[in-house]
């Protein structure tokens, strides 16, 4: 398993609302994204 520096990878993202795959763990993709403004995770 290779280590990934998340802070370094996050610094490479320059677009908002555009998730990027930064790694893989147990067959699942690890994604990072930058957000702008309010982000409502759940809405009722």
Image (spheres, helix red, strand yellow):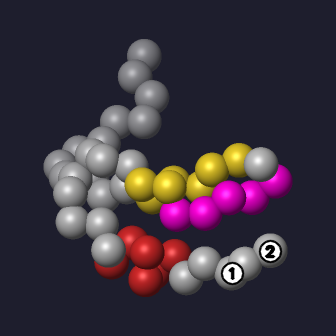
Whether 40 is drawn above or below 5: the answer is: above
Q: Quadrant of residue 20?
A: bottom left
The one of 24 and 34 positioned closer to us in this rendering? 24
Rendering coords of residue 18 (x, y %): 30, 47
Task: Answer with left or right where residue 42 lies relative to residue 24.
Answer: left
Q: Say if mark 2 contacts mark 1, CB within 8 Å.
A: yes
Which residue is situated farthest in the top direction here?
44
Read off the magenta span: 22-26
The one of 40 and 20 positioned closer to us in this rendering? 20
Whether 35 is drawn above or below 39: the answer is: below
Q: Quadrant of residue 1?
A: bottom right
Say few, some or many: other residues with alpha carbon within 10 Å of mark 2 (under 14 / 14 to 19 / 20 or more).
few
Q: What distance separates the C-alpha of mark 2 from that of mark 1?
A: 7 Å
Q: Which mark is residue 1?
A: 2
Is most of the magenta stretch helix, strand or loop?
strand
Rendering coords of residue 44 (x, y %): 42, 16
**Which residue matches tag 1?**
3
Rendering coords of residue 36 (x, y %): 19, 52
Q: What is the secondary structure assignment of the residue under circle 1?
A: loop
Q: Which mark is residue 13?
A: none
Q: What is the secondary structure assignment of the residue under circle 2?
A: loop
Q: Residue at x 43, y 83 (%)?
A: 8
């Amino acid at each position: 398993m290779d280590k990934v520096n998340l802070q370094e990878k996050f610094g490479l993202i320059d677009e908002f609302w555009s998730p990027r795959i930064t790694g893989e763990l147990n067959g699942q993709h690890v994604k990072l994204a930058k957000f702008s403004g309010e982000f409502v995770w759940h809405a009722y």
